[in-house]
Amino acid sequence: MKRILDVRSMRESDAATIAGGISGRELMRRAGEGIFRAAEWKPPVAIVCGKGNNAGDGFVLGTLLADAGIECRILIQGEEYTPDGGWWARQCRDRGIPFLRWQDTESLAEYGSVADCIFGTGFRGRAEGEAARMIEMINRSGARVVSADINSGLNGDSGLAEKAVKSHLTVSVGWFQPGHFLNMAADLMDRRVNCEIGIDPLGPERYLMEAADAAALFPSRKHFSNKGTYGYLGLVGGSRRYPGAIRLAAAANAAMRAGAGVVKTAVPRFLWEPLMPLILESTLFPLSEEGDGIRFRREEWAELAAGLRVIALGMGLGNTEGTREGLAFLLREYGGTLIIDADGLNALAGMLGEEPDLLKKAKCRVLLTPHPGEFSRLTGKSIREIQEDGLTLAEAFAGAQGVTLLLKGPATLVTDGAVTYFTDRGCPGMATAGSGDVLSGILAAVCAGNQPLPLAAAAGAWLNGRAGEIAGERKGDISMTAGDTVEAIPEALREIREAL
């Protein structure tokens, strides 16, 4: 796993490393060398530099390009440099590298590559004036664009921008920041790599989940085992309005394909007969019905929950009184792992308004899986606030409520308030009905093991995202459906296990 540091932690880590004896000038050299080695450079190269340390990385890059015989020119905003950046700028001038002013540059069309060294991860706010013009010019250039540290204009904490460079490659320096993954990041970076330069990380425990990390949760099965070895789990969902949600989670075999031993699918009685011929690997458990949803009967829910390691609840279930009563029963009396999704989250939001300590008192391990709209209802924060500060809001909520929270988005966050995992797998085609139901089925299977819940949930999200990518490659981002993701789970699992 790779560490992820927010901007403040990265700044503190950098300062601590310098205080420990590695000079800022040397760290700048290492950064520039990492950027140089990470990319293929097509001459001539334009190195577009601002005024901060990010520009210093660009100056180092210039010396290395010149030493390699690759033609380059440096475009500067002005003659204002940091002390270390100024030293490296002089090295560029000593090599005869041309310096050009932004104000005198009307086009970058003549360049084969552009190095974006305008702003670093500390940038906040909005790119304006000449900086905004240069960002637009870079995006229009037609050159291969390499962003140093982070795409100029992109917020290093939130991944939001009003105007930012779009890169073919972004080379993070030191450690990744949240802004490399959240919100708009994936639309602005074709590819990203990290260049470690000897900075010891300080700050909260945040990690990027990678294939090998996920693979550890999908070990080879032993011959001396049976279905009970891999977990009995339950999926509770479905209503007259949303009968397909539970079918995607169970009947489409998301849970079984992700490794569950036995799946018990609980649905309102009126869905029992229609789903019976469609669900072959899962057992069906009928729940009493009322109107378009379920009617809570204690004895039924006690029978349903008996012996199950994991229950996932909410997929198309409807936000009804029966849903609220069933959820309250499980929170108070079920001893396994409870995954609350979709209508379960909507019901929970109202219940927390009446009983704020409901989650804190839960008997079971709880995993919540909201998208930003559902998290907004749980917290009372606006969606914009969640986009701007979802990481710290998620960590604060999970820690205060004593739960694990999986916040969906272009990158998925999984946190219990003490440790946070990022998963960056997935594709735009997963923005389609049913994708969350598939994820719930996968999570139920993966969380049936004995691993820490945040780690298991992050591995499940990684598997779901990779399966979605494979489906997108096969069907295209417009035509793929959630069912296509299900069909790709076996291939994604094979890939993951090969990473061990």
Image (cartoon, rainbow, N blue to C red):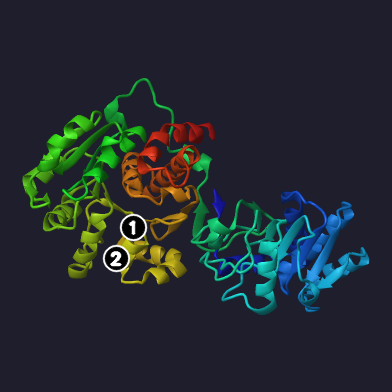
> Residue beneath label 2, please?
378
Q: Is residue 331 left or right of residue 385?
A: left
Picture coordinates of residue 268 (x, y %)? 13, 44
**284 to the left or right of 262:** left
Q: Hey, what amino acid is under mark 1?
A: Pro
Closest to the observer: 306 or 270? 270
Check disc 1 and report its element: helix, strand or loop: loop
Q: Inspect this view and state whether residue 54 appears.
A: yes
Q: Quadrant of residue 360?
A: bottom left
Query: Which SS class for mark 2?
Result: helix
* Displayed quadrant of residue 254: top left
Q: Quadrant of residue 120?
A: bottom right
Residue visible at 53% across and 31% down? 498
- Residue situated in front as seen by the camera: 298 or 321: 321
N-terminal of the pair, mark 1 or mark 2, is 1
x and y percentages locating residue 367 in the rendered image: 31, 52
- Tell me, for residue 265, which label it has, or none: none
**How far separated are the C-alphas under marks 1 and 2?**
9 Å
Regarding residue 305, the answer to whether it shows in the image is no
Q: Position of residue 378 (x, y in %)?
A: 29, 65
- Contact, CB < 8 Å: mark 1 with mark 2? yes
Please say if 405 is above or below 24. Answer: above
Q: How many numbered dots are placed on residues in this image?
A: 2
Q: Which residue is mark 1?
A: 370
Relative to 9, residue 460 above or below: above
Q: Nearer the viewer, residue 59 or 301?
A: 59
User: Furthest-top residue in view?
Assistant: 223
Name the residue located 84 percent from the left edge and 55 percent from the top edge: 65
Residue type highlighted by circle 2: Leu
**Circle 1: is it few (<14), some (14-19), or many (20+) Cα within 10 Å?**
many
